[in-house]
Image: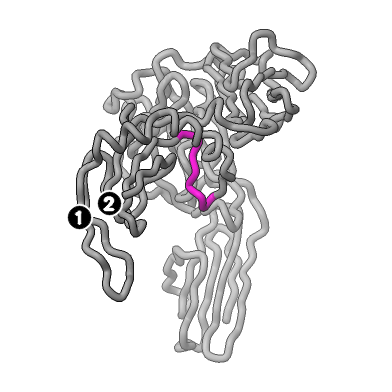
Amino acid sequence: MSISAIAGGTPVGVATPGHQQETKPSVQPQPAKVETVSISKQAQQLANDGAFLSLMPFYCTLPITARSCIKRQVQWNVITYDVNGNPITSGCAASGCQYHSCAGSESGLPIILAQPSDQWVNSGQTATFSVDISGAAPLYYQWMFDQTNVLAGATNSALVLPNARTNQAGTYEVIIYNTLGSTNSRVATLTVNPGPAATNGYVTAVLRSGCANAPTPPPPVGTIRMGTNYVIMSVADANPLNWQNAQQVAADGVFSFLMPFYCALPSTGSNCLMDQVQWNIITYDANGNPVTSGCAASGCQFHLCAGGTTQILPTALMISLASASVGLSWSTMASDFVLEQSTNMVDWNVVYHSTITEQSVTYLHRFLQFRHRGARLHG
């Protein structure tokens, strides 16, 4: 029997730490029967912590790729095998099943594994930048503001800016170095909204497309922010867990006020905007993290953009002909247009979808019009 000290995950078919499991025999003409035994104290004594410590630098220098599943922390695993090399038992080292960090066990120049990301906060909120580094210890850090200003005392892997102010808006980067060399992180941007941060939390009214996440952070109380596929207004500084109050302060009048802004957003192939939207309430804590989300007090129905005050652009109908069908599509950035269809120029029906296709041409004439413009097109 052989005993191995392994820094890594538990192989498939091997008993998990603290348990025993019969190992499936390898594919051979006449596989031998393997007897399962629990991990012994002798195995744990032989594969002691000193053995694992000697292996850590090897594990921690393995290349990290999207498919290797290698992390910068690892459990110490003892596996026993029979004389034919078949796994028998598996368990943790005698010192326990905790994870051991690669910090201090790596080698080489500093390599950035995770870059600092851009931050957007309201005045008074906390902004945090951080990096994850691999390299020979000891590693040293120095954060810079606007690329030339050395931040005194900012010598850790994370830079925390509590109670951020507008004069702290700008760019941040960190220089990382060891005895072998140095590297610079990407330049991350901090945006600080001038409005004050909420003290209790944010209650917001949100109009967003189906592919828009909760906007973070919310704008200062009483202000509106528009993205490519959302409109958000912070309505109140209030307890984010008081949902009844949130539905009262984010009333229907607030959403009706926001509808023209949402309906004027330009539609692209990727922002999922439609001419109808649900009225969504999102609450955030004082640091701008989403807490709860739900519909307005009036319900979860969709509200049409038709009738809203929007930018006025020329309307257009485009007709494409095929051998057995007629395809019609239209576009307009003005939400106060309603497309209607008729077969007799008397009875009109609203067309709700952005594309209509007749699989077979049943009528000799199909009439379409944009109501309010009165532009008619026959086919």
* Res. 117 in view: no
Please state the horizontal and vertical placement of residue 10, each as a whole percent of the image: 35, 47
Q: Residue at x 27, y 69 (%)?
A: 31
Q: Classify mark 1: residues with Cα within 10 Å, few (<14), some (14-19) or many (20+).
A: few
Magenta segment: 66-73
Q: Which residue is mark 2?
A: 88
Please state the horizontal and vertical placement of residue 142, each as a whole percent of the image: 69, 18
Asked whether 130 falls inside the magenta stretch, the response is no
User: Viewer-proximal residue, 144 or 326?
Assistant: 144
Q: Residue at x 55, y 29 (%)?
A: 105
Q: Residue at x 53, y 17 (%)?
A: 126
Please state the horizontal and vertical placement of residue 158, each as a whole percent of the image: 57, 21
* Res. 160 in view: yes
Q: Is residue 314 left or right of residue 348?
A: right
Element class at badge 1: loop
Q: Amino acid at mark 1?
A: Glu
Return the residue found at the far bottom. Answer: 323
Q: Amino acid at mark 2?
A: Ile
Q: Which residue is mark 1?
A: 35
Q: Is residue 228 left or right of residue 233?
A: right
* Quarter-of-image position of residue 296: top left
User: Viewer-proximal residue, 227 or 9?
Assistant: 9
Image quarter hosting the C terminus: bottom right
* Quarter-of-image position of residue 152: top right
Q: How is the image coloured?
A: one colour
User: Viewer-proximal residue, 24 or 327?
Assistant: 24
Q: Are marks 2 and 1 in contact (CB under 8 Å)?
A: yes
Return the residue found at the far top. Answer: 152
